[in-house]
Amino acid sequence: MISLKVASIVGARPNFVKLAPISKELRKEFEEIIIHTGQHYDYDMNKIFFDELGIPEPNYHLNVGSGAQGVQTAKMMVRIENILLTEKPDFVLAFGDTNSTLAGALAAVKMHIKIGHIEAGLRSYNKKMPEEINRILTDHCSDLLFCPTKTAVKNLDKEGITNGVYFTGDVMVDALSDFIEFAENNTDILNQLELNAKEYYLATIHRAENTDDKVRLEQIVDALCQIQNVVFPCHPRTEKYLKQYGLWRKLIKHVRVIEPLGYLDMLMIVKNANKILTDSGGVQKEAYILKVPCITLREETEWVETVDDGWNVLVGADKGLIVENAMEFNPSSKSQSGVFGYENTSENIVKILLSCNVDQA
């Protein structure tokens, strides 16, 4: 029996988390090569995520680094195309909605290589977000679309995409299932930071719509300064804008700003927070799965199910709404609807890949 080859393309932290459970299952049935674009950092700087998540060493490190959207995506496409020409994979797997996702999909589709999109069908319906463009284009390039929710399936149907669409559940459920107990037994981050469970708020801010807009960022900072006991792992790009806009000194006077955390430490900080304030799609979802109330600093979300289920509220960058919900928001019900499915999503995806004839997928 000839082993099929799959190329998994990743480049940013959210991709790594999704890759971890998928790679473990893939390697039981396929030959996998991992292409790390280095979208945010070079491999040496984010090797901690690979080590903590047990992801095999990437076969290729492209070290593209940050840059303008078009330049970054183009660089990745050129380098990915050269690798695909050499490796000749049967499938390319694209994860999520980063520039690495889109670059991998565009390089593969032009070479007539079959594409599987993990986390397909998400829509915020805000095309000002680069991630929204990445999602739409990747979905329309893909042959196999692995949807984390039933809403995602419906979104694709609205756009005329019905072939190769599968409701698989969300690989993040697998990732959290795999790593939460390990994190509890192998990290001491709460003690290191002298934090008591459920007595602090966790804040994360990194999206351009907030960091690049002085008015929005100032509103968010003012709100965080008014809320007591906020812990803020600060993204380097966010720190740059906070200093550029003259907000840094005020923030660090009232908010506990810390360095970005590894995945396991971050899991523990998320799980034990009283509430979370974030503009991150991944953190919204982790908060929901770990049953932590979430306040989202955006006007819309691709994870509408978390709002519909009563565990997430959208407040934008409105200082008053942020403070009010930090004080008063609580889930409408202690139960959840299981909108992201349950465990074994990664196993289901690999079964689908196995069952699809490469020439007809």
Image: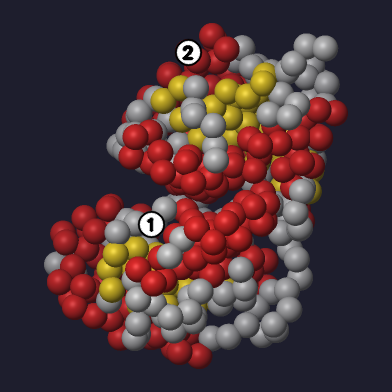
Query: What's the amino acid at mark 1?
Result: Leu
> Which mark is on residue 82?
2
| Residue at the image point whose x is 76% and y is 35% from the top | 350
Residue 147 in the image: above or below residue 334? above
Residue 33 in the image: above or below residue 73? above
User: Is residue 169 rendered to the left or right of residue 62?
Assistant: right
| Residue at the image point whose x is 77% and y is 48% from the top | 344
Which quarter of the rendered picture does the C terminus lie within?
A: top right
Instruction: Give the crowd class for mark 2: few <14, some 14-19, many >=20 residues within 10 Å.
Output: few
How far is the residue under mark 2 from the one under mark 1?
34 Å
Mark 2: secondary structure: helix
Q: Determine the residue located farthest toward the front in the rendered image.
A: 185
User: Is residue 34 rendered to the left or right of residue 24?
Assistant: left
Q: Determine the residue located farthest toward the top in the rendered image.
A: 86
Q: Tell me which corner region of the image, top left, top right, bottom left or bottom right, holds residue 231.
A: bottom left
Residue 140 in the image: above or below residue 200? above
Residue 81 in the image: above or below residue 152? above
Q: Report the residue marked by disc 1.
A: 261
**Front residue (pair 160, 188):** 188
Residue 84 place in picture, x, y as percent: 55, 15
Which quarter of the rendered picture does the N terminus lie within?
A: top right
Residue 348 place in picture, x, y as percent: 79, 42
Front: mark 2 or 1:
1
